[in-house]
Image (cartoon, rainbow, N blue to C red):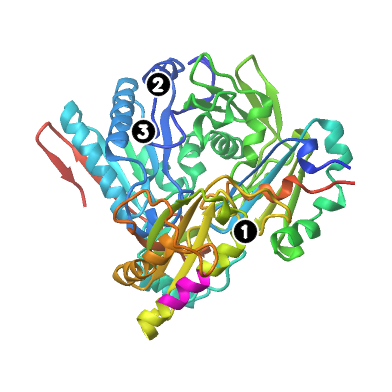
Amino acid sequence: MADSDNSTRILVPAGALGSGVRADELESGLAVAPHAIALDAGSTDSGPAYLASGKSKYSRQAVKRDLGLLMAAREKAGIPLLVGSCGTSGCDMALDWTLEIVLELALEHGSTPRIAVLYSEQDKALLKSKAAAGAVRPLAPMGELSEDSIDGCTHIVALLGPEPYMAAVEQGADIVLGGRTTDTAVLAAVALLRGEHPGAAWHAAKIAECGGLCTVTPTSPGVVMSVDREGFAIAPLSRANRCTPQTVSAHMLYENSDPFRLVEPGGVLDVTDAQYVAIDERSVRVTGSRWAPAPYTMKLEGAGGGPFQTIMLVGIEDPAVLEDIDGFLARMSHALKRKVERTLGAQAEGADISLRPYGWNAVSGRTPPEGSTPPREIGLLFVATAATQALATEIAKICNPMFFHFPVREGKELPSYAFPFSPAEIERGQVFEFHLNHVVEVATPFELMRTRWVNVRSKEGVSADA
Amino acid sequence: MPKLNDVCRYVRSKNAGPFWVTIDLFFDGQDAYQRYSDDPAISAAAIGRLYGVETQAVRRFKVDTLNVVKISIPRSQPQGGVLERDMHSGQQFVPMLDIVLA
């Protein structure tokens, strides 16, 4: 991977911005003369809260630390830095949050990058008209898109493909901050722009998307992908780490429902016939990846807030309870629900109480096999779900004494179980839910996105082009 | 008759997006893969029964080069709802471990 070879080399310093880029890895990465640094900053993996709220999963300090190292490396090498799915969800609010950190760093470092910001949050009215025109299709297992699903979302994003990144780099962007983007598109963009093999570029991006996860030691986060006209090579940034044909090809399984085909905005990557061969002890070469162009679609993600929850946790070690835990929980659940109904009447309608015995079957909810040995202790989680936080807490408070003292058998003395906290009830907040799993047809990759240019011209000034 | 856990070196599960769970069975070597990867106890129909999913909704792939059988099923509810117990579906493989093979 010398500077003289004809490949396009993309430094992927970590699987996610904010997860901890390593300075020593960046330095060895710059030694291969990369054409760009690219990484992803988000996903839906961590749940609907981040898209529904627009808040980042990673801490601001952690993101700022990583961005500081990456912006310095970018400037030193004179290459673009591309960040996809900024702020976890990639909605406008999360993207602006990331931009603010970049501008703060630029001012602190006295650097003057030209920044392209690619917005991909969607307007509800526009989506409704797209849906009415038949341009929105459901993905399994979802049904047709309803207006209610759209209205139930606080934020809706469309996943960008590589084209807006390619255009931004072509127009001289030093830093490209993207809204929600497919994990692969942000990594593939510069290789595609330079005319490399499209199947290889997309496949390399898929392998590199989680950084070190395609290596022997995933805790070393960085990799470099080198894409050329026929295939690609992948290697870890850390000298001590290795990629093997097995670790590389196995990454096609990860968080993917189909290990051979990956649907992207403008086509499908097919790796059925890909060959993975070790080049040396730590690098793998891959050929045979295919790219089949298809009509351009963008995947939609949308999430919004639902009801609220208040929780309580109690520890139980009493063997008299644990020897018939299922019977105990059934009696307790029944008694708690009756008490809430008696106290709140019609107000309790639609509310839910869920008891989850950690240490027994809370994770699966399945009945343990007949004859299972009772646990030594359980952590019993109580979850009240209701339309408002106040009502959920009211329900928890009504249940508190019974949850704390529920007798093993009727007529027995009242036991006391082990609350770890005071007050016992904890307001957990809102339940967030995903509402969309659809694709929207577009005339061009740019139809549903906006590019904004922000120039840092001097230590004092930031100017935004329209 | 061995259990699935006896013939796999690693079994894992994870969300594949908010609406799907994917389960990877890494068989312990080529012999185990060849002998058991088509076992009726891990057919699409059997997996569907185990997870309460229709057979047609079960996606099943054989990855010969890795000695892997990959199974993807729709989540019973989208990730993160009111009754969520396993946000990332990281523990959904566990019911597979005790499957008895022929």
> Which residue, given by chain and number where applicable, does mark 1 sit on?
A324
Q: CA distance from mark 1 to mark 2?
A: 57 Å
The foreground one among A414 and B35 is: A414
Label 2 sits on a secondary structure element that is helix
- Which residue is label 2 attached to? A26
Residue type, label 1? Asp
**Residue A32 location (% of width, % of height):** 46, 17
Query: Which mark is nearer the camera, 3 or 2?
Result: 2
Q: Is residue A335 magenta?
A: yes
Q: Amino acid at mark 3?
A: Leu
* Mark sitting earlier along the chain (1/3): 3
Q: Earlier in the sequence, mark 3 or mark 2?
A: 2
* Dot 2 amino acid type: Leu
Asked if badge 1 and badge 3 are on a common chain, one would say yes
Side of A126 where A208 appears, left or right: right
Mark closer to the chain start, 1 or 2: 2
Asked if the magenta segment contains residue A276, the reply would be: no
Residue bearing the label numbered 3:
A81
Percent x, y of residue A220: 49, 24
Residue neighbourhood size for the residue with mark 3, other residues' Cα within 10 Å, grouped as few (<14), some (14–19), many (≥20): many
- Give the magenta-colored segment's residue range: A333-339
Which is more toward the observer, A251 or A391? A391
Residue sticking out furthest to the left? A460
Tag in front: 1 or 3:
1
Query: Which quadrant of the figure has residue A396?
Result: bottom left
Q: State left or right for residue B93 relative to residue B69.
A: left
What's the CA distance linking mark 3 and mark 2? 13 Å
Q: Secondary structure at mark 3?
A: strand
